[in-house]
Amino acid sequence: MKKFSLIALLVLSAIVLVGCTADDALGRFERSASSTIQTTTDLDQSSSLDINEQEVNAIESSSSYLLSSVTLELTVQEKIEYARSLYTSIALLHANNIILHEGNKADFATLKTSIQAFRDLGATLSEEDKALIISEREAVVASRTAVLETKGDIRMLLIELQGKFNLENIDLIIENFEEIQAILTIRNTHLLLVQEKLSAVQLIVDTYLV
């Protein structure tokens, strides 16, 4: 009896293993996409753009502190306007990233439902589709790794600017705003890539659900 039970267990394990192997590419993509979505959520929480627009707009060239515009590439007023334009760009990028992230979360939820339907059908990926999904996953993982390197950077840059939104610190404001803009651009590129890869895998899975 014990021998029979052991054989049955081995057979069942083999069946499960075959199923997991056939589904491995999709399963790995699903897990990587889930981690990526969570990473972006964490980044949003740690990089809240706590910048007071009134503080930025309050920087005026009429301050008692005067810069020598002769030795600078930009005049004082040009620096002020440039800082304000950077702030506007940062605000737009941040808002766009939030929209993209919410869209990616919705797309991922749809993909998870489709993957479950794929499994319920007992479908098997073609070797070509497996290779494509593996490639898409690698792109997502590489992009996520790059984005993770920026975690906490925006917060530190903003902390450095606390209480310093005045003309005396205009160069620091510009420098930090430029860095924040660059980081948000990296994240924007990442979010667009995730959007693209989710869509690509969704299209592959959909061909098996027709």
Image (tube, grey):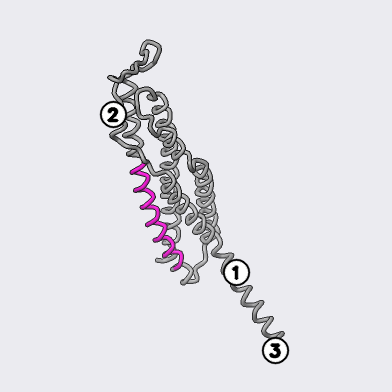
Of the two numbered discs 3 and 1 on the same chain, state the one appearing first in sequence.
Answer: 3
Q: Quadrant of residue 97?
A: top left
Figure check: 35 above or below 181:
below
The residues bearing labels 2 and 3 have C-alpha atoms spaced at a distance of 84 Å
Which one is closest to the eye, mark 1 or mark 2? 2
Q: Quadrant of the C terminus?
A: bottom left
Q: Position of residue 183 (x, y in %)?
A: 44, 37
Which one is closest to the eye, mark 2 or mark 3? 2
Magenta residues, as a range?
Answer: 94-116
- Which residue in the structure is indicated by mark 1? 18
Q: Quadrant of the N terminus?
A: bottom right
The residue positioned 51% from the left and 57% from the top of the image is 29
Figure check: 191 above or below 123:
above
In the displayed image of the protein, which residue is found farthest to the bottom? 1
Q: Which mark is residue 1?
A: 3
The residue positioned 63% from the left and 74% from the top of the image is 13
Three-letter code for the amino acid on which mark 3 is drawn:
Met
The residue positioned 67% from the left and 84% from the top of the image is 5
Three-letter code for the amino acid on which mark 2 is drawn:
Ala
Of the two numbered discs 1 and 2 on the same chain, state the one appearing first in sequence.
Answer: 1
**Crowding at mark 2 (Cα within 10 Å: few <14, some 14-19, many 20+):** few
- Which residue in the structure is indicated by mark 2? 58
Which one is closest to the eye, mark 3 or mark 1? 3
